Image (cartoon, rainbow, N blue to C red):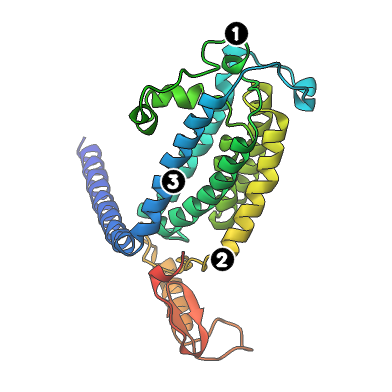
Amino acid sequence: MDEVALIKKKNTMYLAREASKLWRKIASETSVEFQILLEKWQLLLAGIVFQYIHGLAARGVHYLHRPGPVLQDLGFMILPELGIENSYISETVFTIIFISFVLWTFHPFIYHSKRFYTVLLWRRVLAFLVASQFLRIITFYSTQLPGPNYHCREGSKLATLPRPSNAWEVLLLTNFRRGVLYGCGDLIFSSHMIFTLVFVRTYHKYGSKRFIKTLAWMMSVIQSLLIIASRKHYSVDVVVAWYTVNLVVFFVDKQLSEMPDRTGGAAPLLPLSTKEKDRAKEENHKLLNGNSGDTADWRQRTQMNGKHLENGNHATAINGT
């Protein structure tokens, strides 16, 4: 009994010690991210405000929507219709992708293996979303197609919206949840695919797990097929999203300065063994003295945020967006 009690006591002390380290890690990371947020809040706020504008535009086009016969569609011919009772499958897959990505963007607050600052990453993500959504608004206002979704077809009371009695009814997005689930008219191109492709491309660039990258691309393909099978969009809405969003992300990313790589940054969260400590000290000593282990390169280098900058060029942590 004494040995069992001793083991329990040791385990309790270990957990308390690790919990304390974790809390310090979260507090430290929050402090750093808050400082970056104070510098970069304007563009973040602009990106968030545009999400409201995008919702407002989607709500507005619903007033213009007129139901009609569902257009001929190759995807509808190939993929069997899921039906109203199974339409939740598409939304479930999208929710998994959305929540998984959001949680991943905040993992630097907990884990040692981190390559980015969360605030800077979300600035990039919102820039991609805003550019894509701006093009989407122009496109679906140019031509209103009869919606293929069940609630947008002829005979459905939800296919058209009664004219608003005042401007506040539109600006306040009355019945916002109903508008998200039962919107009509905002077809070309798919908003779900905008978020999915932006998230997947961002993880592909800044994520570290090859298996998850492959899985993410597979899920984006599955999401595309489910959107068509559930008749939420025509095939053209999904196809246009694939090449438009990828091109938008490619060109916008070229215009943004690269984020600093944090890979070689802070101390590990969990305690290291003696052997690991010695190896870390040796590697750190080499880095600080400009010796990367390659005898062909002995130039003195300055270490900044896990990067080695030659010729004394310095960069601050919050310079990259």
Is disc 1 in contact with disc 3, using a CB cutoff of under 8 Å?
Answer: no
The mark nearer the N terminus, 1 or 3, is 3
Instruction: Tell which tag, 1 or 3, sits nearer the viewer.
Output: 1
- 10 Å crowding of disc 1: few (<14), some (14-19), many (20+): few
Residue at 65% x, 33% y: name it: 143
Do the residues bearing badges 2 and 1 touch, measured as CB atoms within 8 Å?
A: no
Q: Which residue is mark 3?
A: 50
Tell me the SS state at disc 2. helix
Assign a secondary structure to mark 1. Answer: loop
Q: CA distance from mark 3 to mark 2?
A: 20 Å
State the SS at label 3: helix
How many other residues sit within 10 Å of disc 2, few (<14), some (14-19) or many (≥20)?
A: few
Residue type, numbered disc 1: Gly
Nearer to me, 63 or 88: 63
Amino acid under disc 3 = Phe
**Tag in front: 3 or 2:** 3
Does residue 186 show up? yes
User: Looking at the image, which is closer to me, 262 or 140?
Assistant: 140
Residue at image mark 1: 155
Q: Quadrant of the N terminus?
A: top left
Residue 24 falls in image quadrant: bottom left
Task: Answer left or right for 184 relative to 26.
Answer: right
Looking at this rendering, what residue extends furthest in the top direction? 155
What is the number of callouts on the image?
A: 3
On residue 310, which mark appears? none
Mark linked to residue 255: 2
Question: Residue 109 placed where, x, y %?
Answer: 35, 53
Q: Which amino acid, by three-letter code, is at mark 2?
A: Gln
- The CA span between labels 2 and 1 is 48 Å
**Going from the N terminus, do you reach mark 2 or mark 1 first?**
1
